[in-house]
């Protein structure tokens, strides 16, 4: 049967020749009093997946040709089911792999924020994601989001949205403005999906997503949070009390209509924990509606415990074995930013400001023991930023230096006019300030504040020298 892929109808008896070649099977056949056998290969597109054997025992009638036709139909259906299961497993494996590759392998360590996460993928492969990454001026961005659908389509959509968030974050957008731009991207992706051919399975899957985007500023000890279709995070205070901040709710991403996105600022104390999560982690059973976050608040009543232990406790208390959608929990504990690593000066809004800024910078970097090359470049950057603020900005003028994993130079003024990077010609007398900053700095940008704007530039600090090796005895 496996040679010609055709079924066989065999009458079983004591003198059946092939029974002698398989004594163990022959013993089982005689013990069951089997009288007739139908055997047919399980094939699909010429590939053998298995072999189906049907025995009839006892006083029942013998198999006939009609039974062979029925066995062929059963074998064809079984082979198709096996192949579908294999395809599903393969697609689920691909979707899970793509999702894992698109997520950060581990949360990047930040000076002022300690994070831990819990991420349980749905059985069908979902589009949930979380992220933690550094922003300018020692700030940290935290993101939790999900996309509708399952499988490879949800995973790729998640990757697209996550990439857009990183790109928008480099522009120093406020969280509400970032979600508005992200919503435009989701709408455009939904329109592209709807324009696919009718035989493509993707147009039948609506594209919506949820996302919460938060920015923590350790210098002001505040979170600025905007959310789109996500629950409000839980805030655990250092004394063990918890509450849910009253944050404005925004529509899910991909919605052409609905209220505009809004952001709110929450002031926190050092040692506080903010818990961002998806509704799926609160589901106590697959069919039940998401529960209230009361149990999650109970988990966070001991904020001094390690964050990963709190994530594990949340999993054991809140989750069932089977869940719908990706279950994500991201915990962020605030830590004090070293006050000695920040220096701020108020400068006169006049021609002498650049010289004063260089003097302050030189003295401060000497106290910080910054290497000579980095300090020289920082003086050049500060001079250009302050000169630009004096020429095109408005008072008051402030200079700030931040020494973290990078050295950040900031110039604040009250004007909202954005500086523009120019490529000055040879005969031009000016217009090279920001061009010089962009050339010598690792990164630079403009961030708007309620009182004006901040123009900043970052320099990569060389690694700290390691202690010399101890001398070995001869």
Image (cartoon, helix red, strand yellow):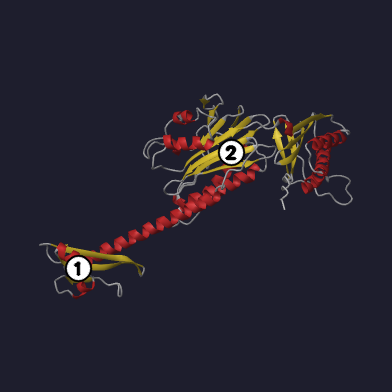
Which residue occupies 66% across, 43% down?
170
Q: Which residue is mark 1?
A: 26
Which residue occupies 67% across, 42% down?
171
Which residue occupies 55% across, 32% down?
274
Circles 2, 1 touching at the beta carbon (< 8 Å): no
Instruction: Report the residue that reaches farthest toward the left.
Output: 59
Instruction: Inspect this view and state whether residue 255 appears.
Output: no
From what the image shows, is residue 474 above or below residue 370? below
Specify the quadrant of the image occupied by residue 456.
top right
Residue 149 percent across, percent down from the top left? 45, 47
Q: Nearer the viewer, residue 25 or 278?
A: 25
The circle drawn on residue 142 is 2
Judged left or right of residue 43, residue 219 is right
From what the image shows, is residue 434 above or below residue 412? below
Residue 197 percent across, percent down from the top left? 47, 57
Residue 135 percent across, percent down from the top left? 66, 40
Callout 1 crowding tier (Cα within 10 Å): few <14, some 14–19, many ≥20: some
Q: Secondary structure at mark 2?
A: strand
The circle drawn on residue 339 is none
Q: Nearer the viewer, residue 14 or 412?
A: 14
Q: Nearer the viewer, residue 393 or 191?
A: 393
Q: Nearer the viewer, residue 131 or 150?
A: 131
Specify the quadrant of the image occupied by residue 213.
top right
From what the image shows, is residue 297 above or below residue 195? above
Q: Secondary structure at mark 1?
A: helix
Instruction: Inspect this view and state whether residue 120 appears.
Output: yes
């Amino acid at each position: 049967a496996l040679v010609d892929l055709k079924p066989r109808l065999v009458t079983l008896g004591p003198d059946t020749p092939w029974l002698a070649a398989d004594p163990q099977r022959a013993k089982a056949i005689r013990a069951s009093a089997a009288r007739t056998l139908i055997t047919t290969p399980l094939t699909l597109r010429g590939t053998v997946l298995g072999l189906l054997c049907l025995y009839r025992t006892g006083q029942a009638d013998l198999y006939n040709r009609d039974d062979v036709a029925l066995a062929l139909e059963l074998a064809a259906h079984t082979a198709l089911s096996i192949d579908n299961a294999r395809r599903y497993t393969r697609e689920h494996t691909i979707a899970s792999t793509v999702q894992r590759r698109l997520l950060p392998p581990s949360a990047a360590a930040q000076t002022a924020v300690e994070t831990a996460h819990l991420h349980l993928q749905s059985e069908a492969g979902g589009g949930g994601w979380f992220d933690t990454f550094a922003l300018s001026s020692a700030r940290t961005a935290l993101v939790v989001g999900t996309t509708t659908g399952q499988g490879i389509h949800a995973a790729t959509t998640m990757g697209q949205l996550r990439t857009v968030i990183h790109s928008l974050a480099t522009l120093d957008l406020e969280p509400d403005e970032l979600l508005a731009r992200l919503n435009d991207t989701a709408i455009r992706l939904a329109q592209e999906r709807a324009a696919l051919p009718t035989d493509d399975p993707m147009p039948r899957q609506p594209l919506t997503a949820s996302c919460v985007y938060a920015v923590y500023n350790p210098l002001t000890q505040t979170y600025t949070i905007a959310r789109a279709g996500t629950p409000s995070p839980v805030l655990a205070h250092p004394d063990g009390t918890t509450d849910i901040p009253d944050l404005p709710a925004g529509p899910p991403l991909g919605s052409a209509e609905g209220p505009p996105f809004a952001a709110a600022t929450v002031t926190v104390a050092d040692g506080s924990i903010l818990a961002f999560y998806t509704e799926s982690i609160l589901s106590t059973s697959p069919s039940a509606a998401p529960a209230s976050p009361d149990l999650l608040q109970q988990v966070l009543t001991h904020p001094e415990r390690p964050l990963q232990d709190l994530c594990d406790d949340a999993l054991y208390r809140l989750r069932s074995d089977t869940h719908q959608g990706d279950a994500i929990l991201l915990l962020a504990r605030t830590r004090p930013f070293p006050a000695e690593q920040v220096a701020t000066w108020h400068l006169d809004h006049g021609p002498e400001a650049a010289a004063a800024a260089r003097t302050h910078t030189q003295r401060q970097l000497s106290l910080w023991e910054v290497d000579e090359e980095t300090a020289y470049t920082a003086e050049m950057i500060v001079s250009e930023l302050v000169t630009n603020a004096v020429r095109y900005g408005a008072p008051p003028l402030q200079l700030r230096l931040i020494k973290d994993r990078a050295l950040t130079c900031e110039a604040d003024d009250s004007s909202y006019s954005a500086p523009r990077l120019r490529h000055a010609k040879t005969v031009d007398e000016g217009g090279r300030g920001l061009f010089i900053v962009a050339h010598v700095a690792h990164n630079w940008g403009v961030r708007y504040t309620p009182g004006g704007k901040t123009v900043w530039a970052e320099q990569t600090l060389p690694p700290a020298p390691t202690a010399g090796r101890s001398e070995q005895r001869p």
